[in-house]
Image (cartoon, rainbow, N blue to C red):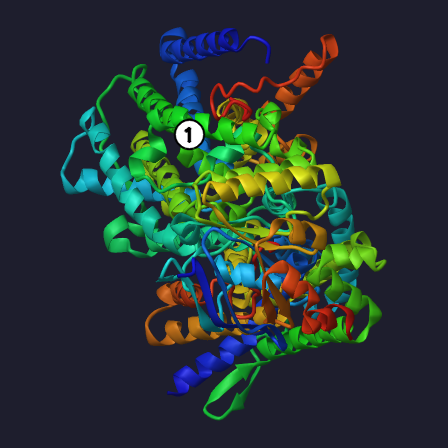
Amino acid sequence: MTLVLEAIVLGILTGGVYALMASGLTLIFGVMRIINVGHGALVVLGAYLSFAVWRALHIDPFLTLVITMPVMFVLGIVLQVVFIRPLKTDREGLSVLVTYAIALGIEGLLGFFFTSNYVQLRVWYADSSFPIGSFRITYVYLYGFLLCLAILAAIFLMLYRTTFGASIRATMLNRTAAQLIGIDVDRVSAIAFGIGMATAAAGGVVFGITNAFNPGSHYDLISRLLTIIVLGGLGSLRGAIIAALVMLVSEDITSVLISPVWASFVFFVILVLVLLVRPQGLYGVRVRDRL
Amino acid sequence: MRSLPRLRLIQGAGVVAVFAVAIAVPALAPDPATTNIAVFTMMYIGLATAWNIMGGYTGYISLGHAGFFGFGAYALGLLLARFGVAGGYPPFLLVPVAGLLTAVLALAIGWFALRTRAATFVIVTIAFMFMLQLLAENLVGITGGGGGLSFPIPNWSGDFFNTPYYYVMLLLATVGLGASWLIRHSKFGLGLLAIRDDEDKALAVGVPTRAFKLTAFVISATLVGMIGGVYGYYVTYIYPQFVVDPLIGISMVLMVFLGGLGTLSGPVLGALILEPAQLWLAYNFGASRLYLVFYAAVFLGVILLLPRGIVPSALDLLERWRNRTGPPASRPATPATPAKAVAP
Amino acid sequence: MSLLQIDKLCKRFGGVVAVDECSLSVEPGSITALIGPNGSGKTTVFNLVTGFIPKDKGTVTFKSQVIDRMGPDRIYELGIGRTFQLARIFPRLTALENMLVPVRRQGLRALFSGAGWSNEKARAMEMLEFLEIAHVAGKLGGALSYGQRKLLELGAVMMAEPDLVLLDEPAGGVNPALLDRISAHIRKLNSRGITFLIVEHNMGFVMNLCTDVVVLHRGRPIASGKPEVVREDAAVLDAYLGA
């Protein structure tokens, strides 16, 4: 029983980083109605950037965020303006191809500069843990979780307490209406993408500390992130967070009770079951074209 | 279009000519390196055409078709192993069976995936593809897992080896094109195009959208599965991550977008351009990961510069040139064929 | 016996009650108008009847068959066609192809056979001629003018020979000359046996064309009967002019 409890706790802790990454992804979809299949590659990029800074400056990997988050934010705006804004019509179909191309490009560049060897960010306190009840929690996982929590909280605060956040939400609800009331949706889109990139940077650090990674790791990541946001409902932040936790907890429980091999499979089963009952996901909205 | 019968004649002659060249390729360029390129190019012509039946006609973009490709490969491989079929011509006879199995899988997956619309559909197809990859890797007892699955090897001579595969791929591509043409000129095809334009309106005029979408999906997947089977047989040994490979799935999509979604010649053109280019890039830059960067650059170039694809853009240019050189061409009101206005 | 019978239909969207215990009937052969101030629930009734949105409560009966759980395509097959407030056609298909999309459920073979084609094409051209837009048969739907689209939409709906046609604001955005033509077309189709239920704001159009009128206010009917009678009804005047 303690094994299951431990699995749940671990699931929640690791679920935090997926919640953060998925939030960025679903925010991008909500604002721009594009599916950023390159999000996994952006996370890996963030991880590698932190890796480079960590190796150069020998600081704690978490601290590299001070550099990588702003850099990724700006990069996000550039990417959005150069590659995504030009797609005027049929955004969904083409956007998938464009973001996939970006992902490939990033994978290629990372492979060129860092080779395909697996690397991992190391903290000096990687093995220290503290006890809770009859099992131990590793500090690293806890710090990672707290970081993600903090950033998510900041995002929610921004969305619901600032004027800019209101313009993001307005654009998500109805792009044309937002334009009509004077919101610069292009600017909102660019900044939203930048925010998405910044969350990818943070996610990248936590991911990079708790996993070995190489340029090809983005496939596995994006498949999980995409299924998370579908389960949660495209465009819903709340949904993304809950879905992420559901995924990681169920995976860890399956890992413990059945076998690690089938862990990721369980999540797909949950997805299928939910889609059977609610094709729009947990918090998604049933889309019906204008009636 | 000024003289319709003459245009039809030219089109028909063109198709026959292209087909004749296609049949003659192994005779014209018999060295294995070239025929290898021919096999892969013909394979992608088939794949792109098959994908177009779903993505191009209905507008539902499936990014999980690589799953059907891999499934077809494993299906054929396992059938051959199960029935102890030796290398040579007989394995080709089991390809339709692999196709049938893929059809059943597509029916199941499509039933789920088509409960959703547009954006969600894309992601669900991706999810199913990764699920299939997982199954391929983990059902070690059946698929051999990461160790891979072997196919029987025919004892054809080195120079001749690629040729039968080429002709089978040509056959499958022809079947795909035939199916695509038949669909486009039928009421079923019109229904699919209507779904693409305005799905709710299609419902309002009685189009059974769910059944139509599912049918297109299954037809598309079956073709892809059969092609996957032949591929597996061609490369003689398959691994999960190389046969259920997202890159294969995205390549066929890109080829259709390049050539022109929903057209007949678009996917063919897209494959003819991109596959040799892809092979050349992989050959010259495959070692360094830069090959991916080049590919990405090509990708982005195509999408941003030619968003509608080559064939529709070319037809547009042609139409505008025609309007310049004569009195404003008014489209004849004669109902020649229903699909006249949609690009050939 | 009525062609279409709506009994105590209810529909709410969140806190907004759009249709409130609405009961009405449409007699066969009539041209019935469904009028009422904006927000009175007219289009919602259409959407409920044609299966685009699910009802909360009540029943809809068509030709003695209960249809309130069916999908839009099944309802079209049974014989109810509809047009939309903003004329909807398929922009990337030609006008003729637009006419050939509607499905009459003649079985699987009909979908792929070439034989039925020429018959259907002939009927389509005939309808296009009737609506006086045959000259644009080869033009893409997206290239048509709004008036042509409205006529095309009506024509396409007619292809399956429905018994009841729901028209959502047929006079909307249409110039007076075209309006007369539309009126004439509807009258001619009606004389061929087709029943119409029309949502409309243009009172002149309604009074001129319709045989019966139902007035909706806040989701429920407040008056029904012959046009001249309804026009004088105090409750109706109050609904339109009052607070």
Q: Mark 1 points at which residue?
A: C120
Kind of residue at badge 1: Glu
Q: Mark 1 lies on which chain?
A: C
* B167 on left or right of B155: right
Identified at 71% across, 8% down, the residue is B326
* A61 on left or right of B245: right
- Quarter of the image that includes the C terminus of chain A: bottom right
Question: Is any atom of residue A125 visible in this view?
Answer: no
The crowding category of the residue bearing disc 1, from other C-alpha atoms within 10 Å (few below 14, some 14 to 19, many at least 20), is some
Identify the secondary structure beneath mark 1: helix
Image spot of residue C78 (x, y percent): 39, 51
Q: Quadrant of residue B164?
A: top left
The residue lying toward the viewer, choosing from B77 and B104, is B104
Image spot of residue C15 (x, y percent): 63, 78
Is C230 located above or below residue B41 in the figure?
Answer: below
The residue lying toward the viewer, choosing from C152 and A153, is C152
Identified at 39% across, 38% down, the residue is B220
The residue lying toward the viewer, choosing from A86 and B217, is B217
* B117 on left or right of B99: right
* A202 on left or right of B34: right
